[in-house]
Image: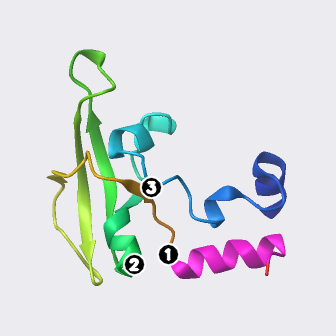
Amino acid sequence: MATIIRELWGVRPAFLKGGYSSSRTLLKLLTPMENHGVGARVIPVADFTHGKLDSFWTITRVDYPNGNFRSGQVFGLRKVRGKQSRRPVQISNIDDAWRLHLQPAEAQQIKSKLGIK
């Protein structure tokens, strides 16, 4: 796994340093991803900067009306302090700044496999 990551993203992958810039809306973040980001974990930048790392969304569905990638609806499961919602709900603040979410343990595990300190 570490070898594949090194080949694809280099020795020090940017997603370990903070992911995408804080100026990306949720649709701009998800659109280039495989399957439009379904399964990705995302966190609003405001929550990230306030240290709410145990609260994030897992994307379950992205709808683009008429194939327009500039507007759409995003649905996901919200996890707040270890408790996850039972069914997907529409994310209302998709125009705010978002970033990918990595659990601290996951980021540390990837860094250790890549030999990054």
Q: In the rendered structure, are the residues bearing label 1 and label 3 in contact, judged by CB atoms less than 8 Å apart?
A: no
* Of callouts 1 and 3, the N-terminal one: 3
The C terminus - image quarter:
bottom right
Q: Is residue 104 above or below residue 57?
A: below
- Alpha carbon distance from label 1 to label 3: 18 Å
Give the labeled residue for mark 3: 22
The secondary structure type at the circle numbered 1 is: loop
Say whether residue 9 is left or right of residue 68.
right
Of badges 3 and 2, nearer the viewer stands 3
Is residue 56 visible in the rendered structure shown here? Answer: no
- Alpha carbon distance from label 1 to label 2: 8 Å
Q: How is the image coloured?
A: rainbow
Q: Is residue 79 above or below residue 54?
A: above
Q: Quick one: label 2, few (<14), some, or many (20+) residues within 10 Å?
A: some
Residue 103 tag number? 1
Residue at 64% of width from left, 66% of height from top? 17
Question: Is residue 113 one of those drawn in magenta?
Answer: yes
Segment tinted magenta in the rendering:
104-116
Quarter holding residue 47? bottom left
Q: In the rendered structure, are the residues bearing label 3 and label 2 in contact, judged by CB atoms less than 8 Å apart?
A: no
Give the labeled residue for mark 2: 53
Q: Which x, y percent locates residue 76?
A: 25, 54
Say whether residue 61 is left or right of residue 18.
left
Quarter holding residue 25? top left
Q: Which x, y percent locates residue 66?
A: 23, 15
Q: Which x, y percent locates residue 71?
A: 24, 29
Residue at 67% of width from left, 57% of height from top? 14
Q: Is residue 80 above or below residue 68?
A: below
